[in-house]
Amino acid sequence: MWTQRETTLTKIDDIRFYLEEIGAFGNFRLATFEFKKDYIRITIEENRSDDNEKALAWDLTLIGVSDYFVELDCITGGLISKVKVLINHEVQIMLTNGSLITATAAEIRLGVPNPKPQEAQQ
C-alpha cells in the first residue's frame, strides 16, 4: 500500500529522532521487503486490524548496502518490535517473532506519510 508522503527524512539524526518520537515502529507491520544488489526497500504499515481505516505506510530505503543479515520467520508474520538506526548507518529491525534484519548502507531514507492527505479535487 502507498500513502502520500509528507516528507522524506535523509539525515541520520532526523531519522533517529523521528523513530524515538513514534516509538520505533513498535507493533507496526513489516509489509514488504525488497532487496536488489546494494539496495533494500522496506514498507512499514500501521497495524490496523481492528478498524476499517486505511493504514498509513512508511518506506525505509537503504542505498549502497555494504553489509546485511536477514533472518525471517515467514510463518508467524512480521510485527515489528523495534527499528533502530545507528550512527554508523546500520539499521536494525527486530520483529516480535524473533526475526532480525540488519544492514549497513551509505544512504538511508525514511518516507513519512501525510496523516491527512489532501482530498482529491473534482
Image (cartoon, grey):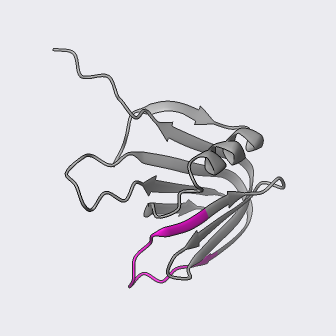
Q: Residue furthest left?
A: 122
- Which residues lie in the magenta part? 70-82
Q: Could you tell me which residue is drawn at 63 percent across and 49 percent down? A: 19
Q: Position of residue 7 (x, y in %)?
A: 54, 30
Residue 55 rendering spot, x and y as whole percentages: 33, 49
Q: Where is residue 48 in the image (x, y as percent from the top left)?
A: 31, 57
* Residue depicted at 71% across the width and 48% down the height: 16
Q: Is residue 99 magenta?
A: no
Is 77 left or right of 98, judged from the image as shown? left
User: In the picture, residue 94 is in which quadrant?
Assistant: bottom right
Q: How many marks?
A: 0
Q: Does 36 sit left or right of 50 as displayed?
A: right
Looking at the image, residue 71 lies above or below residue 1: below
x and y percent of residue 53 in the render? 24, 47
Q: Of helix, strand and loop, which mostly describes the magenta segment?
A: loop
| Looking at the image, residue 90 lies above or below residue 13 | below
The outermost residue toward the top is 122
Residue 43 appearing in the image = yes
* Residue 37 in view, yes or no: no
The residue located at (76%, 42%) in the rendering is 13
Residue at image position (24%, 60%) is 50
Asked if the magenta segment contains residue 73, the reply would be yes
Quarter of the image holding residue 78?
bottom left
> Which is nearer the eye, 17 or 65?
17
